[in-house]
Image (tube, helix red, strand yellow):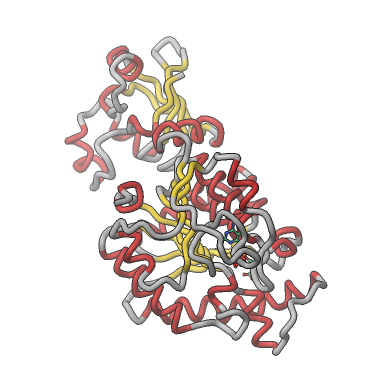
Amino acid sequence: MRSKVTGAQRWVVKIGSALLTADGKGLDRAAMGVWVEQMVALHEAGVELVLVSSGAVAAGMSRLGWTVRPSAMHELQAAAAIGQMGLVQAWESSFAEHGRHTAQILLTHDDLSDRKRYLNARSTLRALVELKVIPVINENDTVVTDEIRFGDNDTLAALVANLVEADLLVILTDRDGMFDADPRNNPDANLIYEARADDPALDAVAGGTGGALGRGGMQTKLRAARLAARSGAHTIIVGGRIERVLDRLKAGERIGTLLSPERGLLAARKQWLAGHLQTRGTLVLDAGAVTALSKGNKSLLPVGVKLVQGSFRRGEMVVCVAPDGREIARGLANYSALEAQKIIGQSSEAIVGLLGYMAEPELVHRDNLILV
Ligand SMILES: Nc1ncnc2c1ncn2[C@@H]1O[C@H](COP(=O)(O)OP(=O)(O)O)[C@@H](O)[C@H]1O
Ligand SMILES: N[C@@H](CCC(=O)OP(=O)(O)O)C(=O)O
């Protein structure tokens, strides 16, 4: 039983080109339908889902009748632009059969290293997840060259897992998981069931690049698992053609390769928070709140805040200072600056009356607080 998998609340599911296109013969709509059914079941069970789908180049190639992946960048980009239409159309119609809406998001790695774009992408994705819509993400291949050349959506999926603070990254691929040698050339290779993502021994086994359609191979999947581990996510690399693969993962069955982060979700998440977000405002605490945070490891309640400065939205990072201006902690605000202004000094029970709704009783939850 894999409790880290069965208990995961937020999943990023990444599906590679080789799988989606039935090895180059256009989009495999039947297979897509089967994954969609399972994703809908996960959704119904309360799992929050983000889908990262490759396959634009491969789908475009098949629409154009090309059998060999082009090497010219502009041809690859054109194929991706053509194929992306069919790709999102296929996901949309398949999810719609189950009454689920989808949303297209095209991202580049650069978008996620630019602070402002990172925050925008994050809040859009959060809003979509809250609306119970399934975001379907791919690279924005028109404006990048390196990513499309290396065909590496594994890294993108890991960055997305960081972005949405996923508990689990599921990489569906054309093999049953990561083997101790490339199964293409080693028929006796054994499946690795569990490992730590940072285990250096994995570098040797993940050698080799991918197939004719996808390009990344196991190396990029291992790198993705290490990247996802930075924000505390577990990664599963598993065969997308395994019958009812997602259902079985959810049920805790030991299929695929589980790569675990070196630290727990909370510790990793806090480090991630500390390093990656700009602060947008300041909360001036009263003496009682300072003690509750720094000595009691408590959440910050609105009642302990005297003043709100700056302009921040829900989910953005704020600095918490003592009455004398000394920084005590940083954390993600559950309310915007405007909302916070209305609820400070009040008990959490008063929030509904003051705002008309309550997101959370805390202004900053302790899981999202880093003490300085
Ligand atoms: N140790 C390994 N275990 C499993 N597969 C491996 C390994 N090393 C290399 N590979 C190759 O990686 C391929 C999957 O990568 P890729 O073609 O990029 O797939 P995707 O399109 O799903 O991202 C497999 O078909 C396999 O041949
Ligand atoms: N973004 C492009 C390339 C992505 C790609 O090849 O990734 P993958 O198959 O996951 O290794 C596409 O959708 O075709």
> Looking at the image, in which quadrant does ligand 1 appear?
bottom right
Q: Quadrant of residue 201?
A: top right
Q: Quadrant of residue 157?
A: bottom right
Indicate the position of residue 150 as horizontal and vertical percent values. Answer: 72, 61
Residue at 35% across, 60% down: 249
Give 279 or 3, whichever is nearer the viewer: 3
- In-image side of 6 versus 122 (left or right): left
Indicate the position of residue 206 as horizontal and vertical percent values. Answer: 62, 53
The number of discs equals 0
Indicate the position of residue 208 as horizontal and vertical percent values. Answer: 69, 58
Residue at 30% across, 49% down: 7
Q: Which residue sits furthest top?
A: 324
Q: Which residue sits furthest left?
A: 349
- In-image side of 67 versus 175 (left or right): right
**Would you place residue 204 above or below residue 83 in this image?**
above
Give 240 or 153, whichever is nearer the viewer: 240
Residue at 52% across, 76% down: 88
Give 287 or 6, whichever is nearer the viewer: 6
Indicate the position of residue 325 as horizontal and vertical percent values. Answer: 46, 13
Give 67 or 186, whichever is nearer the viewer: 186
